[in-house]
Image: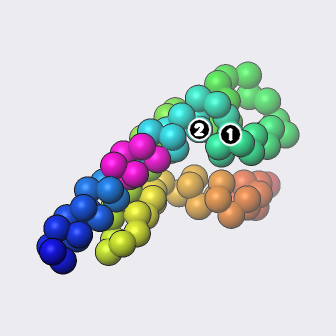
Amino acid sequence: MTDDLSQLLRQALKEVQIELSDMFDQNFERKSFFADAWKRTQRDPGVGSLMMRTGTLRRSIRSRINGNAIEWYSEHPGAALHNEEINHNYFTKS
């Protein structure tokens, strides 16, 4: 019975992982994190939106099942900048 329950939990996690991964991807189309709209950029470059200029950040988001949890991550350096709301100008030369 425990194997059946473990298998059921694993399948449920996989289904949630797929559904939420799609929702994370749709955030880029909505320009928001679910219901919270992304802040507008102070400088308008006139090309695309702040989070979708090249699409590399969007394509870099991955997920994995770790025990009984699902983790989303990205190795793209812009992901940490966005999540921590760090001012990009801090990292640029004057």
State the image coordinates of residue 43 (x, y, percent, origin top left). 82, 36
Residue 77 sits inside the magenta stretch:
no
Taking depth in this image into account, of 53 and 64 the one nearest to the observer is: 64
**Classed neighbour count for the residue bearing mark 1: other residues with Cα under 10 Å, few (<14), some (14–19), many (≥20):** some
Prevailing SS of the magenta stretch? helix
Segment tinted magenta in the rendering: 15-20
Tell whether label 1 touches label 2 (CB within 8 Å): yes
- Report if residue 34 is visible in the image: yes
* Label located before the other in sequence (2 or 1): 2
- Report if residue 56 is visible in the image: no
Q: Secondary structure at mark 1?
A: strand
Residue 54, numbered circle: none
**Classed neighbour count for the residue bearing mark 2: other residues with Cα under 10 Å, few (<14), some (14–19), many (≥20):** some
Which residue is rendered at x = 32% and y = 56% of the image?
Answer: 12
Which residue is rendered at x = 64% and y = 31% of the image?
Answer: 30
What distance separates the C-alpha of mark 2 from that of mark 1? Answer: 5 Å
Q: Which residue is mark 2?
A: 27
Placement of 31 over or under 79, stated as above or below = above
Residue 16 as seen in the image, left or right of residue 34: left
Residue 18 sits inside the magenta stretch:
yes
Residue type at the position of mark 2: Asn
Q: Which residue is mark 1?
A: 32
Placement of 55 over or under 88, stated as above or below = above
User: To which quarter of the image does residue 91 belong?
Assistant: bottom right
Which residue is rendered at x = 52% and y = 44% of the image?
Answer: 24
Residue type at the position of mark 1: Ser
State the image coordinates of residue 70 (x, y, percent, origin top left). 40, 63
Taking depth in this image into account, of 79 and 8 the one nearest to the observer is: 8
The quadrant of the image that shows the C terminus is bottom right
